[in-house]
Image (cartoon, grey):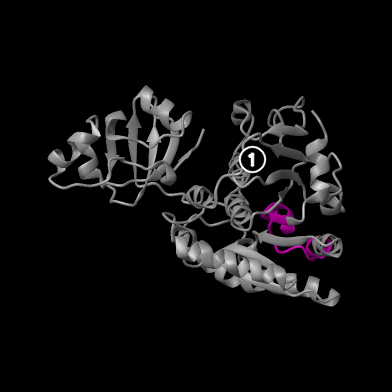
Amino acid sequence: MSSSSRQSLTHARRWVIKIGSAVLTDNGQALSARFINGLAADVITLRQQGKQVIIVSSGAVAAGLARLNIDTRPTSLDELQAAAAVGQSSLVQAYEQAFSPSGYLCAQILLSHDDVKSRERYLNARATLQKLLMQGVIPIVNENDTVVTDEIRFGDNDTLAALVANLIDADALLMLTDQQGMYDADPRTSPTAGLISETDAYDPALDGMVSEGSTLGRGGMVSKLKAARLASRSGTLAIIADGRRQGVLPDVSAGLPIGTLFTTEKQPEPARKQWLASLLHPRGDLELDAGAVTGVCQQGRSLLPVGVIAVRGDFMRGDLVRCVNSDGQEVARGLSNYGSVDAQKVMGRASAEMEALLGFGGDEELIHRDNLITTR
């Protein structure tokens, strides 16, 4: 493949660096001061080159478990939240100690899905991050693990990092892990697995090559691939690289062939569509016929009730819903103009019939194209 995308990394000014628990801790027992100090040195190198950096850091739960002398990661949410509460202060303190000798300030930013679900709060978070970057501060972002529930969590910090990349229009998202990048097979079980140097983020062959995460963190290659695709919506280049490699940040930013680089031929989406992509918890499904799938996915049309053959779930007007094909595969998602009860009344019918069916006038689309994004 051409190295032009690698060369474009040399011009990337705004970076989001995601740090996984596997490289941030000493075998999951405690935060690794050696790694954090090395990371800080790399980030400072980028800052001295005029680049802006946001760090999305895992490690709060792992740090808390170490301080609580708990060897095995719990499965219950309340235990994980308690560990995060204990570990979050240690995590931020470790970053402050690493950056402060060089005169750099850090800022702690804790986000939950509710902060991006609300358009107003989404824009407020964007404004805060933009201001911190303008002031030369290095934001340290993490999910607000102490208050979120399973229903509203991002799922993993790979997803959070991609959303932050979209939020601030980042040029590059670098996900640091304990692997050299993405392989064409699982390197833990296949001795012939080969490293993928560069690929289109939307290559369907990639879905069969990734594996789930380790016990230490929530994010594996599956989540990193999803994050790369999500980041691409804002035109952000995504890279997976080995965080244990000395000087990995400056080397990647210099365009060296390190890790796996994800590119895309798709054009960056408008800001509203990027916000829609950040909404992760649909409340129901609309099953589309073949004509509606083509209209929505290939022709950029709104979803009309005539193209819907089934409505599933209990949702309200304005809720996020999935659009699926006859095989149940998600093809799009968007904000419904009608609740599930009314959607069932008008599905399969022409827009001209809606007022008579519902007893009131309203939007002729179930989902307007401005509130709709494709996902395949």
Query: Looking at the picture, does residue 327 appear above or below residue 15?
Result: above
Query: Looking at the picture, does residue 296 appear above or below residue 277?
Result: above
Task: List the single residue furthest toward the top.
Answer: 290
Dot 1 alpha-carbon crowd within 10 angstroms: few under 14, some 14 to 19, many 20 or more? many
Image position, residue 371 (x, y; %)? 42, 46
Across the whole image, how many numbered discs are drawn on residues? Answer: 1
Residue identified by numbered label 1: 221
Q: Is residue 98 visible?
A: yes
Q: Nearer the viewer, residue 313 or 130?
A: 130
Q: Is residue 67 visible?
A: no
Residue ID at (23%, 47%): 362
Asked which quadrant contains residue 7, the reply is top right
Q: Nearer the viewer, residue 304 or 211?
A: 304
Query: Looking at the picture, does residue 314 appear above or below residue 96?
Result: above
Image position, residue 82 (x, y; %)? 52, 68
Image position, residue 200 (x, y; %)? 67, 32
Mark 1 secondary-structure assignment: helix
Specify whether residue 269 is painted magenta: no
| Quadrant into which the N terminus falls | top right
Asked which quadrant contains residue 24, the reply is bottom right
Image position, residue 120 (x, y; %)? 46, 65
Judged left or right of residue 178, residue 343 is left
Residue ID at (65%, 71%): 131
Residue ID at (60%, 52%): 166
Judged left or right of residue 99, residue 223 is left
Residue ID at (38%, 22%): 290
Judged left or right of residue 17, residue 4 is right
Specify whether residue 36 is painted magenta: yes
The magenta region covers 15-38
